[in-house]
Every structure is written in C-alpha cells, then in structure tokens.
Amino acid sequence: MKVSETHLEEMLRLQAGSGQNYFKDKRVLILNANAIGVLRKDLIYTLGIEKAKGFLIRFGFNNGYQDVESIMSDFSQEEKNDRYQLAILYHKFVGMANVTPLINHRNKDGHTWLCEGTWHDSYEAEHHIKHFGSATEPVCWSLVGYASGIMSAFFGERVIIKEVSCVAMGDQCCRYVGKKLSDWGEEIRPELKYYHGTNLGQGMDWPNTSIQEQNEALKQSVAIHEQLTRMVIDGEEISTITNTVGRIIGGTVIVEDKSFQPVAYYSPTLTEENYQTAQACFSTKDVIGDWRLRHLATMLLEEKRPVRLPAELTKKKVSQFIYPIITKQEVMGYISIFKTSNQLTEHEQMMMEFVVAVFALKMMQDRTVAKTENRLIGDYVVELIEGTFNSEASIIERARCIGYNLKRPHRVFVINLDNVSSPGRSGRGVSKLPDLKERLCEIIYKTFIKHHRCGTVTTNGNNIIVISALESNSTPSDTIDLARNMQKMIAKQLPSVTVSIGIGRICHTPRDFSQSYQEAKWALKVIRALKQKNMVISFDCLGTFALFFKGSNQQDLLAFMQNQLGELMKYDAKYNSEFVETLHYFFNYNGNIKDAAKAAAVTPGGFKYRIRKICEIGGFDLKEPNKRFDLELALKIWCLVKDKKDRVYSP
C-alpha cells in the first residue's frame, strides 16, 4: 500500500450494535474531548503539573505506538520513507490537531532526521486554557507523546517530539521539533524523565504527598480569598486591597479600568513620585498598541482570557501577567502582576483566580455606590440649577448629607458634546451615548482630583452639569484653566471626542445657581452660533453679548438686526449670495481688506467689489462711525440666530 492511497477512515469499523469498534484489528474507543479535558484537569489537580505531564506524555506515546503498529505490515520498506506523511495523517485522523509540516529532512545515509511543523486547533491547548487560563510553558503533552510514539514505531528507534511554542502561552500556533533521540544531544535530557514510568513501589506515596500539597495550597488560597472578601465587605478602598494583594504575591501589582487608566498600584520599590512613569511603561495598552502582540490582544479583549507578556518579548526585566476582571461577561478592568520569573507557580495561578474574583466584586460594589451617589447628586443639582428647592437652608443641608459644602462660592459649567455621532465609531467601550456621558463624568471627576479642586458632576438631558467650588484666592482665569484641563483630559482618554464648555458667573448663594446655569447655557449658545468646537467661553467674557442675552425683550434685538441687515439678508436669500457673511469678515478683521479676503477665500479685488455692492444694497456708508457701530451690533445678533431652524428672515 502507498501512503498516497491510504484512507484511514476505511480501516475504521464502527459496530454500535455489538458495542465494539475496531481500527484494523485493534479495538478502539470514541471519547468526548470535553471529558478528556476534565480528566486532564483532575490529573493535574491530583498529581501536580510535573507528574500529570509525564502521565499524559506516556499515555500519548503508547497510544501512537500502538496505532501505527497495527498497520506497519501494510507498507513495504521503500514506502516507509513516507512514514512522516503517514504520521501526519494519523494525527489528523484521531482529531488531536490539524498538522502543518514545515521541515522533513533526512541525510543520505538515513542516520539523521529532523522535522518541524505546527499544530493548529490543538484540543489539549484549548482545554488547558478552558480550565487553567494561560500557561507559561507548552502544554500539548499527549500530542507530543502521540507524535513521538508514531515516529518511534516507524523508525524502529526512539524519536522525541518537543513542543517549542504553544497557543496556551499566547503564541499564534503550537510548533514542534522532532529528532531521533541520538540526534538531540543534551538539550533533550530534561524531557526524558517524562517518558519513564514509576513502578508501584516508588509510586505508592507520591500521589498522597501531591494531594497534601494541593490541599495546603488550596487552604492558603481560600484563606486569602476570605481575607480579601472581608476587606471588600468592610468597605476598604481598592488601593488598600491592591496593597494587600501585592504583599501576598510579593511583587508589583497594577489595577486598571476598562479604558486602561490606572486605578491602583502596589510595588515594594515604587514610590508615588515615579509611579506615573512606571505605569506608562507597564500599561496594558502595550498589548493593544504593539502589532507583534495582536494575538495576545485578541485573547485579552475578545476572548477575555489572561495573557503573559514575557520579558524577552517586551525587552523588560520582568514578565507581565494580565488578567481581565470580568462580571456578567463584561470586562470591568485589568489586573497585572509582574514577576522576574517567566511563569507563575501552580499556587500563584490558583490564587490569582481568587484575586480576580475579589476585584470584580469590589468594582461592582464601587459602581453600585457611584450610581447611587450620582443619582442623589443629580437630584439635588437639578433642583439647585432649576431653583425648585424649598429654602436655601434645606438645599445646603442636603448637600452636607452627601458630603458637599454648598456654602463656598461656586461656578456652574455646562458641557456639551460637539458631535454626538462620532464617539460611537471611536475606541473600545464607548459605543453608546449614555455610556459616553458616564465616561465623561468619570474623566471630569478625575480632573477635579488631579488638580485638587472640589466639585460635583452629573448629567441633565444631553448636557453634563458641573458645579465647581472656588478657592478663596481664585481668579476668573483659574476657572477657564480648569475647564481647559477637562478638555485636555478628555482628549487624552477619548481622542475622537471633543466638548465645548460654557461657564456661568459666580454663585454666592444657592439662589444664584439657577442664573449661573442659564448664563452657562447662553455661553454654549454663542459657541454654537459661531460654529466653534472644543471651545470654552465664560459668561463674564461675553461683553456686549451678555447685554443681549440678559435683555428681557429679545424681539427688540431681532428687530434691530432686521432693521440694519434686512436688505442684505433679503438679497442673500434671493440670489444665494453671502454678503452678510462678507460684512462679518470685514468687521472681524477691523476693515483690513487683505486679511478679510484671505479668510473669506476670495481675492482682495473681489472682496472690495463685495463691500461696494453691500453698501449699495444696504444704502449705508461704512465710513460713518455710528453706522459701523450699529452694523457690528446687528452682526453679533445675526451670529447667534443664523443657525436656528426658524430663520429671522424668510423670503
């Protein structure tokens, strides 16, 4: 028989009626891969990693050797030169993995042989990740044994297959190298112990010893879990819990939120001063930003599995182990631990499962508390800015009950998204407007903390309302700076999002908040009228605009604008021209034709023509000071109303 003509499925005889299945003349079993995965897990828990590895390698070796032995007589000596291809067929046939050969080399005398290839969809890597998470060394032990057994049977001498990379370690595929035992040299010596069984006399007490070790490790892990859970129940801060975890592990720990922003850290050697630098060097964002690690990013973000950043890959002195913190299939954040060793011990892996569960519990608790506080804050802020509270004393007392001092001077900020459609196409985790507003509130609150300012943040409709307390020596520029710092923080964490901020005047009593809120909204209206984005305007700085907005009869202002610009607006509407806009450029650039023409994207000669035509249509002379003043005021009103749906003038 030739290998090219071999169809292994034709040698399989399924006899469900008799309860016996055969491959050639050897009885075979059909087993569920999930059940094998559970058996494998139990072996590891019962025997420990090392002994379970040896058990599975030997099991695989004997399985492969027996499978090939049953068909050896079907192939002539010459055809055995294709034995490697037949071994690949066997590997695929039994369903362990999909094999892709890369190298198959023999020298002319046949004494030296080398093979290399990859395993895709390894059942063993799949189930190791399912039960234990990411690994720090190759775990396809039964595949290694099976391949070694097949090739040893074909060659008639010991062949050792060694796995050198593994999906369970975060690699893109499992890769193996195979040689005859005589060709390996000293490199293979550490693996040989797994191919030698333990006799009954030697093996009587080691399972019991391993079980005792496992029980002791489990007791320690449970005790740690109880300690950390008690800290959550007692309301300890997440930074305190992180410090405890770091001391237990004996290494650096960094906790980040789902946007990879630092939440807490612990290090035996790291100080507060150099923490920011260290966090930037070891952020989970490294996984996202480095194209070489895209397979790890997929595991971490999409498959929500732990990953390892080995020191040799990141060129750092330590390996980073990153665990997603998950509740109800939602990633709440990430916890990283750093070790000089390239792997975690079995006890450390077990302990990290408990640690991650505790941080998930703490983050859920913090979220629930924050939502409750935000609801309480939101209720009282809405009453404050709408002026619907019963008395000043009652609203001050309500603020005190939630830990806020309303007796200090304040300013009201109103923050509005410049474009509510673009954030949905931005980065991860900010796809819905409510989620985005919640994220913006978090960033603004962090800005308060970073700049040592006091205030509250809540949402009201499409706006975010900020009440900022003023320091005793505060200046108007300090308030503007705080607003710009909010914009900078938002731009850093949500690059595709921009906001504009309107600021009302100082509130000295609770009754002032309603007026300050209206002023902040008017400041935002100016920004929209001027078609600006990412802008900050304080009502104090509006000058003449402020008089317009505080005027009790805005119809008079609109009539004034109509009187000054009405003929130009009619002409623009009829001929689709832009003479009002041209006049606006003229005044914005103080009558400088060259600069105004450049801004209007026309030639200076063309701009001069437009100005002459404007004077002709409007029936005025721009050299008259009083007329210039009236036109400038009318244009300011026009800027505010030109984008309304109900136009001031409708032809």
Image (cartoon, grey):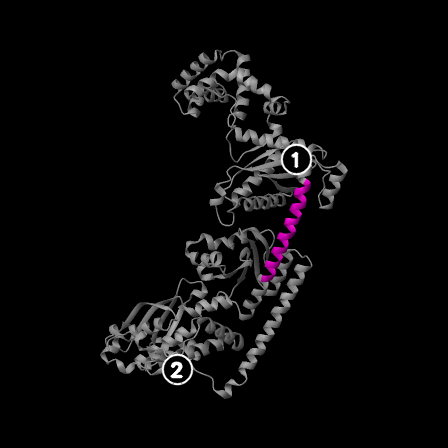
**Quadrant in which the N terminus is drawn:** bottom left
Which circle's residue, 2 or 1, is located before the other in the chain?
A: 2
Q: Percent position (x, y) of residue 73? A: 27, 83
Asked if residue 248 is positioned above or below residue 470 in the image, the reply reads below
Left or right: residue 394 compared with residue 269: right
CA gap, disc 2 and disc 1: 86 Å
- The answer to whether residue 26 of the structure is visible from this angle is yes
Q: Tell me the quarter of the picture where residue 603 sits.
A: top left
Left or right: residue 128 compared with residue 409: left
- The answer to whether residue 138 of the structure is visible from this angle is no
Q: Which mark is residue 6?
A: none
Instruction: Say what amino acid the circle numbered 1 marks.
Output: Arg
Q: Is residue 495 magenta?
A: no
Asked if residue 269 is positioned above or below residue 113 in the image, the reply reads above
Q: Around disc 1, counting alpha carbons within 10 Å, would you say few (fewer than 14), some (14 to 19), or many (20 or more)?
A: many
Asked if residue 569 is positioned above or below residue 295 in the image, the reply reads above
Label 2's element?
A: loop
Q: Tell me the quarter of the picture where residue 168 sits.
A: bottom left
Majority SS type along the magenta span: helix
Residue at the disc numbered 1: 411
**Front-most of 603 and 327?**
327
Residue at the image position 46 percent from the left and 56 percent from the top: 297
Residue at the image position 44 percent from the left and 54 percent from the top: 290
Residue at the image position 72 percent from the left and 35 percent from the top: 510
Label 1's element?
A: strand
Q: Are marks 2 and 1 in contact (CB under 8 Å)?
A: no
Q: Which residues are magenta?
A: 357-380
Identify the residue at the far front of this view. Answer: 17
Q: Percent position (x, y) of residue 537? A: 58, 31
Q: Percent position (x, y) of residue 448? A: 62, 43
Q: Which mark is residue 18?
A: 2
Instruction: Say what amino acid the circle numbered 2 marks.
Output: Ser
